[in-house]
Amino acid sequence: EVQLVESGGGLVKPGGSLRLSCATSGFTFSSYSMNWVRQAPGKGLEWVSSISAGGSFIYEADSVKGRFTISRDSAKNSLYLQMNSLRAEDTAVYYCARGGTSDWSFGYWGQGTLVTVSS
Amino acid sequence: EIVLTQSPGTLSLSPGERATLSCRGSQSVSSSNLAWYQQKPGQAPRLLIYGASSRATGIPERFSGSGSGTDFTLTISRLEPEDFAVYYCQQYGSSPFSFGPGTTVGIK
């Protein structure tokens, strides 16, 4: 069974940093692209960042470029999102989602972790 | 950057009725890399359709997707009580992998 479990969310002050983790199991992690998607309270889905299966290709939304960094560790079957210079508008539930091997649609999702940026 | 618009914003229907949801891109979506997701309150999104028309694993046949280029449609042939939710389209053919604003399918 495919499982994605996010962790690392919490309350942080504006300008602060946070590192989200997504622990995966039930599939060959190194074969799949991975993604982060966020959802502000009461709002729609916003794509944040994606990384290819081998880690060679990284894509980022303009809203996080230069502040957030996606990475992956195949030895730990884990995906990460390093978030720096956090702003109030980054407050959201952050979801980890698995892409495909040839199709990059987001076939499996974690339950999300809440990040709140507030003083 | 491809901007997706969805219409209508809200759809009020009764169980058993047909739902037709539209997703339009500001530019052509490459290789029909268009997906549809369903989200219920307090839950993570669930993939329904990928590649514009392929049903994801375990998705009932009443869900179907069609379209190409800039115009795509999600059809639910006969609404079941569990289908009342928010539906998002997403293009993943070119970065940024944008989502549409969503269509809420509510009970009439």
Image (spheres, coloured by chain):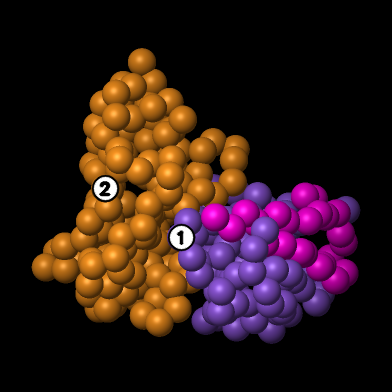
Image spot of residue B53 (x, y percent): 64, 81
Furthest toward the top, the residue is A119
In what element is the residue under mark 2? strand
The colour with which the image depicts chain A is orange
> Is the stretch drawn in magenta largely helix, strand or loop?
strand
The answer to which image quadrant residue B20 occupies is bottom right
**Which residue is label 2 attached to?**
A69
Marked residue chain, label 1:
B
Give, as a three-letter code, the residue at label 2: Thr
Q: CA distance from mark 1 to mark 2?
A: 16 Å
The answer to which image quadrant residue A33 occupies is bottom left
Magenta-drawn segment: B1-25
Mark 2, other Cα within 10 Å: few <14 / some 14–19 / many ≥20: some
Q: Residue at x 43, y 33 (%)?
A: A91
Chain letter, colour purple: B
Residue A29 visible, this orientation: no
Residue A53 visible, this orientation: yes
Image spot of residue A84 (x, y percent): 26, 34
